[in-house]
Image (cartoon, rainbow, N blue to C red):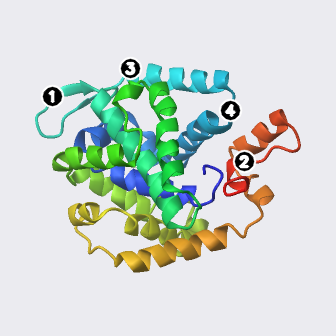
Amino acid sequence: MHGDPMMWVAGIRALYLQALLPRAVRGVMENSTAFDRDAWGRLMRTANFVGTTTYGTTEAAERAGARVRKIHGMLTATDPDTGEQYGVNDPELLLWVHCAEIDSYLHVLRRSGFPLTDAQADRYLAEHRVSARLVGLDPAAVPADRAGMAAYFRKVRPLLAVGADARAVDDFLLRPPTHPLLIPAREVLWRRVAHLAYASLPPYAHELYGRPAPEPAVVTRRLRATGTLLRCVPARLRWQLPPKHILGAMARLGPHARPAPYKVGH
């Protein structure tokens, strides 16, 4: 799944969703000056972590997880409503970030036409208890199937809200800082991707952000059309994009190795 080009749309959806938990997004805002000055670098570091835990060696994944846990253990934030100081490695916050991310990956890829059965979708969620452990979560506390994930979102729904921090994330995702010469491309390409990612959010997220929810059938058609188009780009060309984890894994495994999408359904 993680070799599919729709992962970029899914990643943006995850950011929209993660911003809805005030304490989680406050932790990002207080501890990441890079959000404004090195936004692209931050996104690439996230992509590098996902790529390492997906396609890297066990040792590389464990090192990446240890690095994340060490950084989170040193950071604190202040509750925007109560003024309480808390650690960004709070398990409840880590669980929200994890679930919003993994749910977005699964939701966007399946809705865009990636061929997964319900059993395979449950397996995908179960496998991600490993990545949850790497960032400091107890795997037993992480949803391991679609039913568990749905129950988790029902539980956390009353805690979600859109405040100033979520608005800042929304503004950034619609108009990320870029070189002046690239602004036309941002308006033509990036905004289309961001709008599509936003459109794929659940209805309660549209309600919280205060923008009308698009017709679900229309969104599904757009996701499928976009997925079909992007999957026409030769895989070898797509894999050249950084951080190139797929090519690295194939080099380790040998010339006949291929990512899982080439084997699904065969």
Determine the residue positioned at 52% across, 44% down.
Answer: 124
Q: Secondary structure at mark 3?
A: helix
Mark 4–mark 2 distance (CA, rounded to whole Å): 12 Å
Determine the residue positioned at 48% across, 60% down.
Answer: 108
- Mark 4 = which residue? 56
Residue type indicated by callout 2: Pro
Q: Is residue 34 left or right of residue 182?
A: left
Mark 2–mark 1 distance (CA, rounded to whole Å): 45 Å
Residue type indicated by callout 4: Gly
Residue 259 numbered tag: 2
User: Measured along the vertical axis of the image, is residue 15 above or below residue 50?
Assistant: below
Comes first in the chain, label 2 or label 3: 3
Q: Residues within 10 Å of mark 2 (few under 14, many from 20)?
A: some
Residue type indicated by callout 1: Glu
Instruction: Answer with the quarter of the image where residue 180 lies.
Output: bottom right
Q: Residues within 10 Å of mark 1 (few under 14, many from 20)?
A: few
Percent x, y of residue 99: 38, 43
- Residue in the foreground of this view, choosing between 241 and 128: 128
- Mark 3 = which residue? 73
- Residue in the foreground of this view, choosing between 167 and 1: 1
- The C terminus, quarter of image: bottom right
Comes first in the chain, label 3 or label 1: 3
Q: Secondary structure at mark 2?
A: loop
Q: Which mark lies nearer to you, 4 or 3?
A: 4
Q: Secondary structure at mark 1?
A: loop
Residue type indicated by callout 3: Gly
Contact (Cβ within 8 Å) of mark 2 with mark 3: no
Q: Which mark lies nearer to you, 2 or 3?
A: 2
Percent x, y of residue 186: 54, 68
Q: Which mark lies nearer to you, 4 or 1?
A: 4
| Residue 244 visible in the current orientation | no
Comes first in the chain, label 4 or label 3: 4
